[in-house]
Image: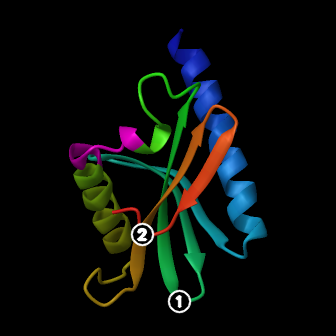
Amino acid sequence: MKLTDKKRIGDYYEEVACHYLLKQGLLLLAKNSQCRFGELDLVMQERTCLVFVEVRYRKNNHFGTAAMTVTPNKQAKIIKAAQLWMISQQLNPEQTEFRFDLFAVTGREQEWIKNAF
């Protein structure tokens, strides 16, 4: 699979996740926010809580589910990226309510995992 195909598939499932979460009442603040530690797929808000959403896709579960692909190393990168994003928005990470959610799609199954890590 070429990189452009992976990017297109990733963009598609980020849109799926975004539309689903918007229907659940969350507000979109940012998409594909880049920093030196990586990318934040979706930054949303649910009431007073910032929600950093990692979107993962796997065609099937032959080698595990999409949710299983968020390794401790990946989690650490997302956490650092989220801290930098909050600082860039002039928010204090120690005084801001936030959480990390996972929107995982494996085959035709999708799940939204709140407080995934």
Q: Nearer the viewer, residue 19 or 58?
A: 58
In the rendered structure, the answer to whether residue 30 lies left or right of residue 108 reads left
Crowd class of label 2 (few under 14; some 14 to 19; many from 20; radius 10 Å): few
Measured as percent of width and height from the top left, residue 14 is found at: 63, 45
Q: Identify the residue at image location x=25%, y=59%.
A: 80
Quarter location, residue 11: top right
Give residue 81's mark: none
Do we see residue 89 in this rendering?
no
Give the image location of residue 57, x and y in percent. Answer: 55, 35
Real-space Cα distance between discs 2 and 1? 15 Å
Q: Residue at x 48, y 22 (%)?
A: 62
x and y percent of residue 111 in the render? 60, 53
* Quadrant location of the N terminus in the rendered image: top right
Amino acid residing under circle 2: Asn
Secondary structure under the numbered disc 1 in the rendered image: loop
**Residue ID for mark 2:** 115
Q: Which residue is mark 1?
A: 48
Q: Residue at x 58, y 17 (%)?
A: 4
Judge whether residue 71 is colored magenta. yes
Q: Earlier in the sequence, mark 2 or mark 1?
A: 1
The structure's colour scheme is rainbow
Residue 15, given in percent of the width and then of the height, sits at 70, 46
Which portion, as a residue range, is magenta?
68-74
